[in-house]
Structure formats: C-alpha cells, structure tokens
C-alpha cells in the first residue's frame, strides 16, 4: 500500500497511539499499515510472537515510523492486563483501539461442542469486551479522549447459519458499540464498528471456504470483493480526528452484498455429510499447520 491508496493528508495521525488486536495478519495488518503511514505509533498484538514481529519489521522497513509487536492472547485476562501495562509504560495512554482479533470456522451447529463455542466466543465476544473494558477504565481514570473500532460483519443484522458462535459474538460487540457510545462518549470515548464484506485473507479462506475454490463474487452487486485500501480508508476515517461526531455506528463496507444476499452462509444448507466431514478435516489440518 502507498500513500496514494489512502485519501488522507500525510501526518493526519501524528501523535496517535493505536492498538490493533490481531494486527499481524489479514485485515488487522492492513489497517495497521495505514495507521502507521499516516503517522500513528501502532501497537500490534497476536498470539504468535514471530508473526507480529515479522509484520512490525516489514511495515517499518516499508514506511518508517514505529510499530511495536506484542504477544497477547485476548482469551487470557492476565495477558491483556500485561499488554496494557507494557503499552502504557511505553509512552502513555493509547488514543485508539481496534478490536480486530477473531476466530471462526464453518460448522453445522449440531456438530459444535461447548469447547468449540468457547474457542470462538472467548476471542471475539469475551476477549474484545475485556480488552475494551480495561482500556476504558484507564481512559476514564485519566480523563483521556479515545476512539474504539470493532471489526464485525453484516451478520450482526441478520445472523449467520453455520457460523453461529461468530454471529452471536459479533452481534454482542455490535450491542457493546451502541451501548458504550452512549455511556462513555460524554467522557470523550467514542465507539464505532465496521462490517466488512468479502476481503479475502488467508485465515478467512482456510476456515470459511475450506473446500477451496474462488470466493463467490457473483452474489455481489458490484461483482467483486473488497480492496484492502478501501477498508483501511474507512478505518482511518472512523478512527481519525475529522469525523468525531460519528458515534455508535456499525458501517458496512461490502458493495451492498448484504442488501443483495444477506451475506451469510445460507447456501451451505446444500452440503452433504461428506462435504461437512471434508470441511472439518480441511479446517483442522490448516489449524494444525
Ligand atoms: C467443528 C470444531 C472445528 C470445526 C474446531 N472445532 N474446529 N468443531 N468443526 N471445523 C472444535 C474442536 O473439536 C474443539 O472442541 C474446539 O473446537 C476447540 O478446538 P481447537 O482446535 O482446540 O481450537 P483452537 O486451537 O482454540 O482454535 C480455534 C480457533 C482457530 C481459535 C478458531 O481456528 C484460530 O486460531 N483462528 C484465528 C484465525 C481465524 O479464525 N480467522 C478467520 C476469522 S474470519 P472439542 O470439544 O472437540 O475439544 C471472521 C469473520 C469472517 O471472523 C467474515 C466474513 C464475511
């Protein structure tokens, strides 16, 4: 990505200090790159140290600036507290948080165990809430302004068969966005969310398109998937200083796919038992890799 891909003036985010959970890969990496290019100090966290370290090196080599890679499993409360202590000790309060880390896989709901539900919900729902809560407590105690973005999906409006733990968890974060936008914005902390359509990433393809093949674009009115700079531009818009009156909103960026199709996995109802077995094996093989 170059500055020409972004629609903002250089230096727009100078002095900002922003944490992107799951910032080492996929959408989180793209948003981190844009924040860095516009002058923010970017903290990226993930479960795998080498992944976040490599991303930080690559982004700084490409654009200069400062990306700080940190290991954190947002399912673990102590890990979150340790992460925030490290960041606050490294130059003071964050000015922004992007709740991007997620987990998901397609499965018939009747095949899920409680642990399978927890594997998703403890990242997306509980982990993102607890990260937000601990940042919020610090911001409120210090009287700081801050901006929080959560990465959701259009399923928050219509649910999603075959990815029910994700749909439930993301809907919970949608409610968090609306609720805290009211509760905390009088004290300077605003909340918005992004509901991306298909922006193919490796993690998403392995778990949501485990049979392989091209991601469907024919259901999309614009006949294409999202382009990463488009997502980055929206994240900067919501995070940055130019549009602070936007608060409590979940904004879709999907080429109107939601309006056209509902944007979920309803078509998987046609899969056979053998298809589901193959999907599960493919997902678990990728998880083990
Ligand atoms: C049924 C499954 C399963 C599957 C795992 N389980 N895969 N059940 N079908 N395909 C069950 C297991 O049997 C086990 O339950 C439980 O889930 C936990 O399994 P683990 O392998 O121990 O899980 P874990 O190591 O925690 O890893 C799961 C994960 C992982 C956290 C979700 O895949 C991961 O790291 N994902 C991060 C990246 C990712 O998912 N990216 C895609 C995000 S896309 P039992 O009871 O058997 O022990 C997204 C939005 C997309 O979020 C929007 C598109 C528009």
Image (cartoon, grey):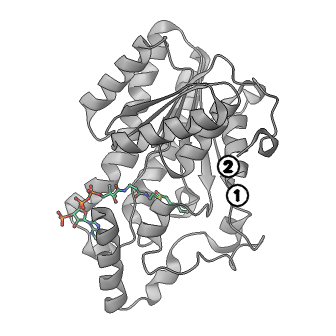
Does residue 190 appear in the picture of this structure? Answer: yes
Q: What is the x, y in percent for residue 102?
A: 42, 50
For the residues marked 1 and 2, what is the alpha-carbon distance in whole angstroms?
7 Å
For label 2, the SS is: helix
| Picture disc at residue 21 | none
Q: Is residue 170 above or below residue 141?
A: below
Tell me which corner region of the image, top left, top right, bottom left or bottom right, holds residue 147: top right
CB atoms of marks 1 and 2 within 8 Å: yes
* Percent position of residue 199, x then y: 61, 60
Q: Which mark is residue 231?
A: 2
Name the residue at 51% across, 36% down. 57
Q: How many marks?
A: 2
In the visual, does 130 lie left or right of 257?
left
Q: Would you say the beta carbon of the disc 2 residue lies within 8 angstroms of ligand 1?
A: no
Crowding at mark 1 (Cα within 10 Å: few <14, some 14-19, many 20+): few
Rendered residue at 37%/88% (across/down): 275
Give the answer, above or below, for where 158 lies relative to 278: above
Q: Position of residue 158 (x, y in %)?
A: 55, 64
Note whether residue 247 is visible: no
Along the line of sight, which residue is nearer the eye, 19 or 256? 19
Q: Secondary structure at mark 1?
A: loop
Q: Quadrant of ligand 1?
A: bottom left
Q: Is mark 1 within 8 Å of ligand 1?
A: no
Horizontally, residue 143 falls left or right of residue 106, namely: right
What residue is pinned by disc 1? 227
- Residue visible at 44% across and 9% down in the picture: 141
Residue at (46%, 22%) from the top-left corner? 136
- Residue nearest the observer in this picture, 245 or 277: 277
Comparing 214 with 134, the one in front is 214
| Quadrant position of the C terminus in the picture | bottom left
Image x and y of residue 213, in percent = 53, 81
Residue 120 position by quadrant: bottom left
């Amino acid at each position: 990505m170059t500055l020409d891909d972004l629609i903002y003036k250089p230096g727009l985010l100078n002095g900002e200090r922003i944490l992107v959970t799951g910032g080492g890969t996929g959408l989180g990496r793209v948003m981190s790159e844009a924040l860095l290019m516009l002058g923010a100090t970017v903290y990226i966290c993930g479960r795998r140290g080498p992944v976040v370290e490599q991303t930080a090196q690559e982004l700084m080599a490409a654009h200069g600036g400062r990306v700080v890679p940190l290991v954190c499993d947002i399912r673990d409360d102590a890990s979150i507290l340790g992460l925030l202590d490290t960041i606050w000790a490294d130059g003071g309060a964050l000015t922004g948080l992007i709740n991007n880390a997620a987990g998901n896989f397609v499965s018939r709901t009747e095949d899920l165990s409680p642990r399978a539900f927890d594997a998703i919900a403890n990242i997306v729902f509980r982990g993102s809430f607890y990260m937000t809560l601990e940042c919020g407590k610090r911001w409120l105690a210090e009287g700081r302004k801050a901006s929080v973005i959560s990465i959701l999906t259009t399923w928050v409006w219509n649910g999603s068969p075959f990815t029910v733990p994700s749909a439930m968890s993301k809907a919970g974060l949608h409610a968090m966005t609306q609720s805290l936008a009211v509760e905390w914005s009088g004290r300077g902390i605003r909340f918005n969310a992004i509901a991306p359509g298909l922006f193919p990433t490796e993690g998403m393809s392995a778990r949501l398109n485990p049979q392989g093949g091209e991601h469907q674009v024919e259901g999309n009115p614009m006949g294409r998937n999202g382009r990463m700079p488009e997502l980055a531009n929206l994240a900067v818009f919501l995070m940055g200083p130019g549009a602070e009156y936007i608060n409590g909103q979940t904004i879709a960026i999907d080429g109107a796919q939601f309006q056209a199709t509902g944007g979920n996995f309803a078509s998987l109802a046609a899969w056979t038992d053998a298809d589901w077995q193959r999907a599960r094996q493919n997902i678990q093989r990728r998880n083990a890799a």
